[in-house]
Amino acid sequence: MVKLEMIFFKTNYPRVTKVVNVTGLLADWDAKSQSFRVGSAEATAKNKLLFDLKTKYYHKADDWEIEERNWSPVELSHAFDEAEQIQAEVRIKSVLQMIDALETRFRWKIHSYLPPSVHFKVIP
């Protein structure tokens, strides 16, 4: 059995690791594709969980980039730890504010920037 940890990386910052609550057999892990080999419903569920987790962190980093926030991998690794404890405040935006926010987001997507790197590492 192995357990996985996520590695958060951003240029000019030290790498940060975070243990993920996903375990499996070492023989089922494919290091090249960063996922479990598909062959059972359990592997498919684990891969979906890993993909969702990775996507969640990518979106958070993307939001911070759009806000032009100077964030670090340590902040990103703990971003959802605090979010689970604090209830999200409800913010209502006007249509114009929403259009401006979407325009800014798409502008960032079009321009090339290096997204943060999130990889999984096997802990023996």
Image: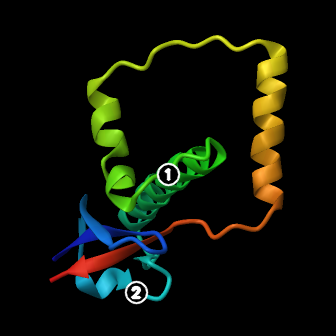
- Determine whether 39 is above or below 94 in the image: below
Percent position of residue 43, x then y: 39, 67
Report whether 123 appears left or right of 92. Answer: left
State whether residue 96 is above or below residue 115.
above
> Looking at this view, is 14 or 77 the one in front?
14
Instruction: Looking at the picture, tell me which residue is in the foreground, 37 or 18.
Output: 18
Of residues 85 and 74, the one nearer the viewer is 74
Mark 1 secondary-structure assignment: loop
Residue at image point 81% right, 47% down: 106
Location of residue 74 by image quarter: bottom left
Please tell me which residue is depicted at 52% across the width and 12% down the height of the picture. 90
State the image coordinates of residue 5 (x, y, percent, origin top left).
27, 68
Alpha carbon of mark 2 to alpha carbon of mark 1: how far? 31 Å
Q: Residue at x 79, y 36 (%)?
A: 102
Quadrant assignment for the C terminus: bottom left
Lateral position of residue 47 relative to residue 20, left or right: right
Query: In this figure, which residue is indicated by the disc labeled 2?
Result: 31
Image quadrant in which you'd find residue 97? top right
Q: Of callouts 2 and 1, which one flags the residue occurring earlier in the amino acid sequence?
A: 2
Crowding near the residue tagged with mark 2, few <14, some 14–19, many ≥20 C-alpha atoms within 10 Å: some
Q: Split into 4 quadrants, where in the image is the N terminus?
A: bottom left
Using residue 5 as the reference point, say whether residue 30 is left or right of it: right
Q: What residue sits right under mark 1 in the picture?
A: 70
